[in-house]
Image (cartoon, rainbow, N blue to C red):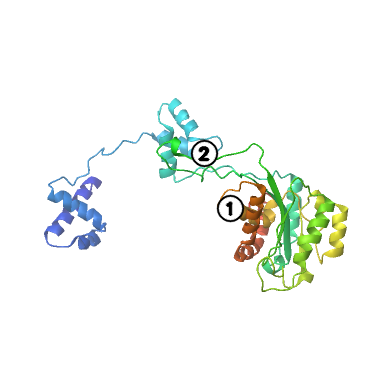
Amino acid sequence: MNVRLEKVEVHNRAIGMLLSGKTQKTVALSLGKDVSTIQRWWCKHKAHKSLQHKRGAGRPKKLSRVSKIVIAKSLGKRHKSTRSMAKKLTNMGNTVSKDTVHRYLFKDLKVHPYKRPKTPLLTEFHKKNRLSFYMDKVNWAVDDWKRVLWSDESPYELFHPLNPQNDRIWARDGTQVTPRQTVKFPAKVMVWGMVSYQALSTLHILPQKETINAKYYIDEILEGPCIQALRRTDENRGILERKMIPDMSKAIFMQDGAPAHTARKTQDWCRQNLPGFWEKQKWPGNSPDLNPIENIWSIVQDKIDKMKPAVNVNYLEKMLKNAWSSIDPDILERLYLGMPMRVQKCIELSGEYIGK
């Protein structure tokens, strides 16, 4: 039977059942329709309106079949903005706007635009080292990873630019939108921190215009907040005061390949003062995605972005300390639970960048 005739027959059956005294809910259940549909049909019947769907009702589709294929083939490719695709389709004879292309991508193909993420440039040498590092730990369980104390430095910027995709203001016109003030060369604050699966060191903030060389790293960081955190004894205090791991004799101190970390003096200090640490040849270079403290730095930045914007370096430093101290311990636990998956993914990708 013709599909259109089938629809008319269902309409008629519904009206007949309603006229016989059945409720709209009963009719809806019997015919497999929504109650709102049955109600709409009944209102049309009482108003003596046709129940038959009119052919051609609604706005005609502007995209041809060929144009839809062209758009679908653009998915995953670079330099395929809605504007450029609309221009290409127009040149092919199907005149459409960028809004039409956007609507088809968003509503019909169910896709969204994404910015290309920035990843470190990995050479074959880097990939080989990354793969070797994780192949050596392929049999490590979560408890093995819980022995590792991850450390790193990170810069934070005054007047940090927010994601423009999220920083939106709805208004009637542009005059109602408050501008975001920027500066050409914003001041930066460099911090150092260390994390375990259950605790954080205190956050060390470098003085302005100070650079990290081996002497500063040893005197102000390793012999300061690092060793202080390693000497904690209480496991029941706050996240900035509790013991880093239960058995510190099994701890492994991690630092990346920054010059201050790999300097001979630094390596000698670590051998003399730390129960265990990965020497400079151990950690693979160019591998922030393998270090879970990078996730913590991102969380700190997210917390700062939600605070009232800092107007000077001193205020930014206070915000950094507040954000650092408010890290949820459950986040640390989840990061360590995810380490075996990082290992597996790195191996599956033959040492390629795995994301954070």
Separation of disc 1 and disc 2 at Cα? 21 Å
Among the 4 quarters of the image, the one containing residue 133? bottom right
Task: Please give left or right for residue 123 compared with residue 218 in the image.
Answer: left
Q: Label 2 neighbourhood size at 10 Å, few (<14), some (14-19), many (20+)?
A: few
Q: Which residue is mark 1?
A: 302
- Give how far across and how far down residue 271 sits, in percent: 86, 62
Q: Secondary structure at mark 2?
A: loop
SS type, badge 1: helix
Q: Is residue 312 above or below residue 59?
A: below
Q: Where does residue 222 sit, x and y in percent of width and height?
A: 80, 59
The amino acid sitting under disc 2 is Pro
Residue 209 visible in the current orientation:
yes
Q: Residue at x 17, y 53 (%)?
A: 42
Would you place residue 134 above or below residue 94 in this image? below
Around disc 1, counting alpha carbons within 10 Å, would you say few (fewer than 14), some (14 to 19), or many (20 or more)? few
Residue nearest the viewer, comparing 191 with 129: 191
Residue 34, image x and y in percent? 26, 57
